[in-house]
Image: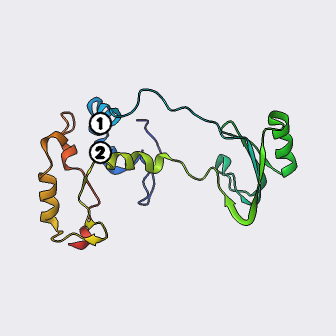
Amino acid sequence: MKEHAHNHDHMCFCACTNPVVTLLKKDLFCPENLALMTAGLSEKKAEVVQPVPIIFTGGIIRPMIDGKAEMVEAIGFAEGQVVATGSLSLVTGKMDANFKDQYTIRYLEPKQTLLPGLFEPHIHVVFSGLMASFVDVGPFDGQNIRQGYDKNWVKEKLRAQPATRIRKCCFICKWLGSGFANTLF
């Protein structure tokens, strides 16, 4: 994992600075666990289909490029990249120069908003993927609170995990749980 020099002073952790991941990353990402995480994946990679080139205009468009949040009149995309941002004539000119007769124009309604650079997928995807293999110690059974949900229930649920959940290189994986709700105790 790449080390990052930034940190957040609130509880919205990006995966690279999440305290659980930081504490356990050597165990969680050991070769045996990586092999288990990828065991069911097809060896053949999915075909990547490029979206059709498109210009968006109208509405509220904030490209969020280089950390800037200024509004623009239009934005053009092609081959998975932003081709141009700015006035509709500037974006159309750039798209015509590179993708003449290949793009469509989408007109946004006045209150529709496009924020193409706002979300960075690593923030939730990595940790959510890791937590999918954790033991569910949450208080809910469907829509209802579990009968007898307390600290002892959580301890017994973790203790009851079969030995096959214990990874040789990550003995602590047996004890990782998701959904814990101490506010109900």
Q: Within the image, what quadrant is residue 69 found in?
A: bottom right
Image height of 166 relative to 35, above or below: below
For the N terminus, give its image quadrant: top left
Q: Position of residue 170 (x, y in %)?
A: 21, 38
Residue at image mark 1: 26
For the C terminus, give its image quadrant: bottom left
Position of residue 169 in the picture relative to residue 51 (left or right): left
Residue at image mark 2: 23
Taking the spot 56% from the left edge, 52% from the top edge, the residue there is 119
Taking the spot 83% from the left edge, 38% from the top edge, the residue there is 101
Q: Position of residue 160 (x, y in %)?
A: 12, 52
Position of residue 49 in the picture relative to residue 86 (left or right): left
152 or 16: nearer the viewer: 152
Image height of 95 relative to 74, above or below: above
Position of residue 145 in the picture relative to residue 64 (left or right): left
The type of residue carrying mark 1 is Lys
Judge the density around disc 1: few (<14), some (14-19), many (≥20) Cα neighbours within 10 Å: few
The type of residue carrying mark 2 is Leu
Q: Position of residue 123 (x, y in %)?
A: 47, 49
38 or 9: nearer the viewer: 38
Task: Tell me the tag on residue 1.
Answer: none
